[in-house]
Image (cartoon, rainbow, N blue to C red):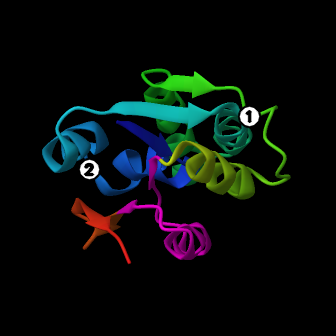
């Protein structure tokens, strides 16, 4: 099963000391983590910042390197968030995100979302 991770999902481990891959394994069993190239570009931009967010983005880039990178150039949507939604809908894959806008949009389209609960663990959400 493919599981799409967005930028804030990849930053969660550094920000909240959560092992995202172990958590996903406990929730789903086997899975294939995928990341859009637009998400990698977003993290690259964020990684130039100093402080906690820059460090979290740099760590997120190291996690993205362990995932299958999908070229997002063939997606019609403009923003990275829209590309995440479009890819998830096209490929009916779950998405790991804490972004409320992405989560709500995916819910309306019947796509499962995995989000952080109590800043400690991941939780599968579906509406």
In the image, taking residue 126 as reference, residue 5 lies left or right, namely: right
Q: How many marks?
A: 2
Q: Nearer the viewer, mark 1 or mark 2?
A: 1
SS at badge 1: loop
Q: Which mark is residue 121?
A: none
Q: Residue at x 69, y 34 (%)?
A: 44
Residue 81, position in %: x, y?
69, 57
Q: Which residues are magenta?
A: 93-114
Q: Which residue is mark 2?
A: 18
Q: CA distance from mark 1 to mark 2?
A: 27 Å
Q: Earlier in the sequence, mark 1 or mark 2?
A: 2
Q: Residues within 10 Å of mark 1 (few under 14, many from 20)?
A: some
Q: Residues within 10 Å of mark 2 (few under 14, many from 20)?
A: some
Along the line of sight, which residue is nearer the eye, 52 or 27?
27
Give the position of the N terminus as an image quadrant: top left
Q: Which mark is residue 72?
A: 1
Q: Is residue 127 above or below residue 86?
A: below
Q: Is residue 62 above or below residue 8?
A: above
Q: Verify CB contact (< 8 Å) between mark 1 and mark 2.
A: no
Question: Is 108 within the magenta?
Answer: yes
Along the line of sight, which residue is nearer the eye, 62 or 27?
27
SS at badge 2: loop
Q: Which image quadrant for residue 30?
A: top left
In the image, taking residue 41 as reference, residue 1 lies left or right, namely: left
Residue 7, position in %: x, y?
57, 48
Q: Is residue 45 above or below residue 92?
A: above
Question: Is 73 within the magenta?
Answer: no
């Amino acid at each position: 099963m493919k599981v799409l991770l967005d930028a804030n999902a990849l930053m969660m481990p550094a920000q909240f000391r959560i092992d995202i891959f172990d958590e996903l394994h406990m929730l789903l069993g086997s899975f294939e983590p995928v990341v859009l190239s637009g998400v990698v570009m977003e993290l690259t931009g964020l990684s130039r910042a100093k402080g906690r967010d820059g460090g979290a983005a740099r760590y997120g880039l190291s996690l993205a390197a362990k995932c299958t990178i999908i070229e997002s150039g063939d997606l019609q949507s403009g923003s990275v968030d829209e590309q995440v939604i479009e890819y998830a809908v096209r490929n009916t894959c779950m998405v790991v995100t804490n972004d409320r806008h992405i989560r709500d949009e995916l819910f309306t389209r019947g796509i499962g979302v995995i989000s952080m609960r109590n800043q400690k663990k991941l939780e599968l959400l579906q509406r």
